[in-house]
Image (spheres, rainbow, N blue to C red):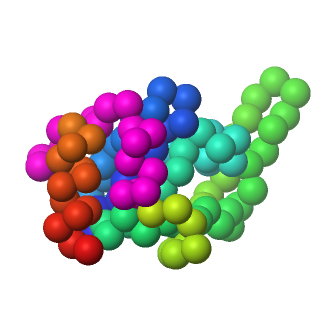
Amino acid sequence: MITFAFSTDDRGLEIFPTREAAIAYCEGIDVEDGLWVFWDENGIGLSVEFTVPNERGRFSVVSGKYHLKPFPESISLLEFSDSIGYVEGRGLFNTPEDVISYLQGIK
């Protein structure tokens, strides 16, 4: 189950083979701060639900635990695709155009 993750700080789209891989890569602290936006293999938005909150101490931070769940009311990845600056290539997806072609093919 492919998961797309968009980094809002550098406009890069990362493609992960599973939701678990995306969660392992995208730290909870950064997710809570809005630095990542997620979509499923069909380009449908995913929302974040924390099961263990992040901890922010005076001198340290500890990422909490979260999972991703469908959020079809959000903007689709296809609608959002103009915002993609680059794609971190994984397999068939090496450019924004590759992602757009894939999403148009599953509509």
Residue in the foreground of this view, choosing between 22 and 65: 22
- Residue 34 image offset from top left, x and y in percent: 65, 44
Give yes or no for residue 84 being in the magenta stretch.
yes
Looking at the image, which is closer to me, 21 or 34? 34
**Where is residue 104 shown, x and y percent of the image?**
23, 64
Determine whether, in the image, residue 8 is placed left or right of residue 85: right
Q: Position of residue 92 (x, y in %)?
A: 12, 49
Quadrant showing the C terminus = bottom left
Q: Quadrant of residue 6?
A: top left
**Residue in view at x 17 percent, y 67 percent:** 105
Magenta segment, which residues? 77-94
Decide: is 27 above or below 76. above
Say if 17 sits above or below 42 in the image.
above
At x 81% / y 38%, what residue is drawn?
Answer: 56
Q: Is residue 82 magenta?
A: yes
Q: Residue at x 67, y 63 (%)?
A: 50
Position above or below: 106 against 3? below
From the viewer's perspective, tell me whether residue 19 is left or right of residue 17.
right
Placement of the N terminus among the 4 image quadrants: bottom left
